[in-house]
Amino acid sequence: MNNLAIRLYNSLTGKKETLETIEPGVVKMYSCGPTVYNFFHIGNARAFVTFDMIRRYLKYRGYEVKFVQNFTDVDDKLINKANELKTTVEAVANRFIEEYFIDAKTIGIEEADVHPRVTGTMEEIIAFIDGLVQTGYAYVAGGDVLFETPKFKEYGKLSKQSLDELLSGSRVEVSDYKRHATDFVLWKAAKPGEPWWDSPWGKGRPGWHIECSAMIHKHLGDHIDIHGGGHDLIFPHHENEIAQSESLLGEPLARYFMHNGYININNEKMSKSLGNSINVRDLAKKYDPRALRLFLISAQYRNPINFSDDVMQQMMAAMQRIDASYEHVVLRLKSPYLPEGEAIDLSDFENRLVEAMDDDFNSAIATGVLFDLVREINLYLRSDEITRKGLLSYKEKLDSWLELYGLEQQERASDKEEIERLVAERTQARLARNFAKSDEIRDELIKMGVHVEDTAQGTRWWRD
RNA sequence: GGCGCCAUAGCCAAGUGGUAAGGCCAAGGUCUGCAAAACCUUCAUUCCCCGGUUCGAAUCCGGGUGGCGCCUCCA
């Protein structure tokens, strides 16, 4: 492994910078999680997968990663959903947190070290707001507490907007009780029927931005290395987090802000108003979830990507190519007649992968390197110098990379035994040269969505 | 109006000064009892257009055209 440094694009400066962590060897990382009022959609998935990939790579490079991702479990959307379902906000939140973990696992997103919930961070949030009121950065207005944006002189540094520009922008909400149009809510007074918590300013609940500031402070400290989220969170969310945290704590919230690009659906923006969002739960029924993950990492994370059925078909085929190669190696390893041989030096491949990922996590190039390895493996498999150690070298490399990419094969138990019984039966028929029967079984398998491939080392099978 | 991004083969996608990665599709071939499978090979003299800088540009600069995002809940 080389010892070059990791470089990453920092939204704060608009440049690629060398990663220098606060504490050597440790990366403190926070990424904005979902508001748990529904299944998460493919846009959310891109953000989660992006930061999961970054986290995996940082670990791969030997860093200890402390990763926190929140659940927003109380807000307007949850309240509406609870009303709609005639249940409580808490019940909605619990339900969709559970669903989050199911879908996250499906597309290979590992659990964060901590998944704090707003409702479990209330004390710290209130203390944080209180601190801002005490130090004069926030003011109380009609039961609400607002952050006074001009008090934070660097307001706008992330979104590269001056306060004047923001104030003159026609789209900033105007509200009479605010001192400035850009001021934002830290604490919201409760309306009848809404969940509430006691606070120095009366019954209410936190505004959206404050939770992340409080959670970061609680779980990771006064400042962190990497703060991530979708591109659309730059303003106002992350801008406001910076204002809150840096006003109170007096040091930069995060050294590096990272933002993933958008995902379009059939060249259209995916948005709640267009109603064209697609959730991962449904997608996973239609496509191999690993193909979905491959799609998400096949472009560099900052570039926008377009989701379409056509592209997913391409990803399915690409995924098959990887699987086939891997399984052929595994099959060959079962052969009892392999010479021991020598391990194969794959450091060139490794270096190329590291070089790609070190450069702002360029997973597009990195997946290209993976496919180069696959080609080399395929060539090796048809050569006449196959050895056990050689095969193992390739297998180990693939295992390691597939784990890094989060593309490991997942066991889909269901009817596995039945399939393997049929495959074995077919093999018997073939050995007896009863091809009528073997083809009959093959047809049956195809009806079950199972394909077979006969190799010199045996038959392998896979599902659609 | 302010801030910012993008334009590379039929499709997807890297490449930001040294002569176009990778995937899908397609064509040809190998293997196979057969095979929809698997594998191999081939597949952009050219990077939206026009100028300029340079020995050299898809890459830098100027201008143009087209598309997009944020400024409002949103990954």
Image: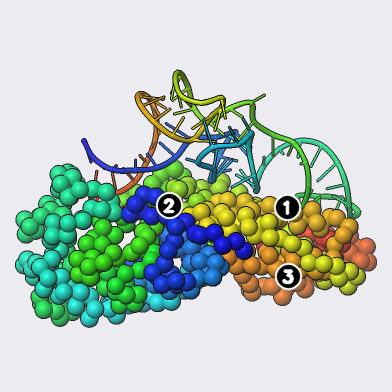
Q: Nearer the viewer, mark 3 or mark 1?
A: 1
Disc 3 on helix, strand or loop? helix
Amino acid tagged 1: Arg
Seen from the viewer's position, the closer of residues B54 and A248 is: B54
For disc 3, the marked residue is A419
Seen from the viewer's position, the closer of residues A366 and B27 is: A366
| Residue lying furthest right | A432
Q: Which of the chains bears the disc numbered 2?
A: A
Quarter of the image for residue A387 reads: bottom right
Q: Quadrant of the N terminus of chain A?
A: bottom right
Asked whether residue A332 is in view, the answer is: yes
Q: Work out whether mark 1 precedes mark 2 in sequence or the reverse, and give the earlier one.
A: 2
Give percent across and percent down for residue B57. Answer: 54, 29
Seen from the viewer's position, the closer of residues A407 and A388 is: A388
Give percent across and percent down for residue A418. Answer: 72, 73
Disc 2 on helix, strand or loop? strand
Name the residue at 11% across, 79% down: A200
Q: Nearer the viewer, mark 2 or mark 3?
A: 2
Residues indicated by labels 3 and 1 sit on the same polypeptide chain: yes
Quarter of the image for residue A438 reads: bottom right
- Distance from disc 3 to disc 1, alpha carbons, whole Å, reads 29 Å
- Distance from disc 1 to disc 2, alpha carbons, whole Å, reads 32 Å
Give percent across and percent down for residue A32. Answer: 36, 65
**Label for residue A16?**
2
**Label for residue A375?**
1
Asked whether residue A30 is in view, the answer is: no
Amino acid tagged 3: Ile
Name the residue at 26% across, 53% down: A157
Quarter of the image for residue A118 reads: bottom left
